[in-house]
Amino acid sequence: MKRVFHHPPEPSNGTKYWRSIGELKDTPEFRQWLEREFPEDAAELNGDEWSRRDFVKMMGASMALAGVGLTSCRRPELHLVPFTKNVEWTIPGKFLYYATAMPRRGGGIPLIATTVDGRPIKLDGNPLHPASGGGTDTFVQASILDLYDPTRSKRFVHKAKASTREEFEKFLGEFGKTILNDQGSGLAFLVEETNSPTRQRLRTELEKKFPGMRWCVYEPRLGEEANAAMQTAFGPNARVLPKLDRADVILALDSDFLDCGQGDLETTRGFTSRRRVSASKDSMNRLYVVEHRFTLTGAMADHRLRCAASQIPAFAAALATKIHAETNDSGLGSLLGNFQGASNTFDQQ
């Protein structure tokens, strides 16, 4: 039975409090809503011969009958078969750790993989490796879920039609014979950029077996300009590994080095280590960023200048000219001879 609370009348004078716009305006709809036990959208079955209590009893009886009908249903029988030969280092219920690495286009992240009965369940940074120091990023933590993704392909598909393992093995055998007879002509591999030595070894073996094959690397964010600049300055097969933990002032010219997609976790850790002050003698680094778009590195900058991408070389030349005028560095002066024209095209205002 509904219980109606009779509140004392509100005083005619003094402060009047209200809890909603409807109560303030005192509309008929609000008055009707107050008379109801539940809001208008509640499952109350208004206008029906069934009450809420009858509905609950009916649902309870239906679920009880469903339980009676499912008494003969049970889980499928699964037969547990022991190992004929026990796997080395595997103890049921015990964790087993492996030192591994996750390749990135800029290097790799050292990791410790935690496994249970042969199944990896967690990835952590390797605390014994200076490149990670026990840290990871979001891509590493998300990669473990790929192994247990319910949307992963569970069947063979050939030309958008379902196939079987037997048909795939038959096609692979026939295709392998054809490619082998043609010395790999017509065979191409499309891969992404990585520094994995295992994949490089596989490529070498494939090239020996299929001399006519093609190995194509596609990486939309490879940064060919940066690689060309490094090879020009330091020679072929050179790679810059900045020690940002030792830098007091950092200048990023259209370079988002804090982007986690770069895969260089050591650079990020080195930069952030100088952003924390634990004692009065500690000093923070200072980051200057010149870029044409807003990036994560720009968000962390102490001083940020928005500049068109076409003006970045001119800005670099103008800055180098100003530094040379203050320091009179001979090496910088010889380098500036090739960029005098570019420095004059930048508007320093």
Image (cartoon, rainbow, N blue to C red):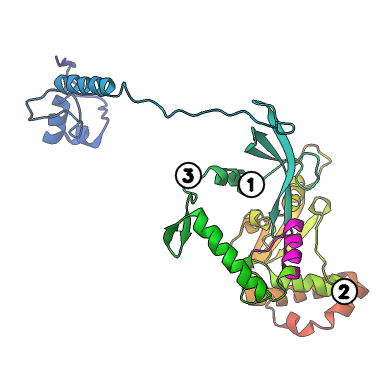
Q: Is residue 90 visible?
A: yes
The quadrant of the rendering that contains the N terminus is: top left
Q: Position of residue 67 (x, y in %)?
A: 28, 21
Q: Position of residue 31 (x, y in %)?
A: 13, 30
Of 76 and 194, nearer the camera is 76
Q: Position of residue 188 (x, y in %)?
A: 63, 71
Residue stretch in magenta: 192-208
Considering every residue shown, the one lying at the far bottom of the view is: 341
Label 3, label 1: how far apart the Cα atoms are: 19 Å
Label 2, label 1: how far apart the Cα atoms are: 41 Å
Q: Residue at x 23, y 37 (%)?
A: 21
Q: Amino acid at mark 2?
A: Leu
Q: Residues within 10 Å of mark 3 (few under 14, many from 20)?
A: few
Q: Amino acid at mark 3?
A: Pro
Q: Main secondary structure of the magenta part?
A: helix
The quadrant of the rendering that contains the C terminus is: bottom right
Q: Is residue 213 above or below residue 142?
A: below
How many numbered discs? 3
Q: Which image quadrant is residue 50 in?
A: top left
Disc sitting over residue 332 in the figure: 2
Which of the two discs, 2 and 1, sits closer to the camera?
1
Pointer 2 or 1: first along the chain: 1
Disc sitting over residue 140 in the figure: 1
Q: Is residue 73 above or below residue 156?
A: above
Q: Residues within 10 Å of mark 1 (few under 14, many from 20)?
A: some
- Quick check: is 193 in the magenta stretch? yes
Please tell me whether mark 2 sits on a helix, a strand or a loop.
Answer: helix
Asked if the residue under mark 1 is in contact with the one under mark 2, i.e. CB atoms within 8 Å, the reply is no
Q: Position of residue 161 (x, y in %)?
A: 41, 61
Q: Amino acid at mark 1?
A: Val
Q: Residue at x 64, y 65 (%)?
A: 191
* Residue wearing tag 3: 150
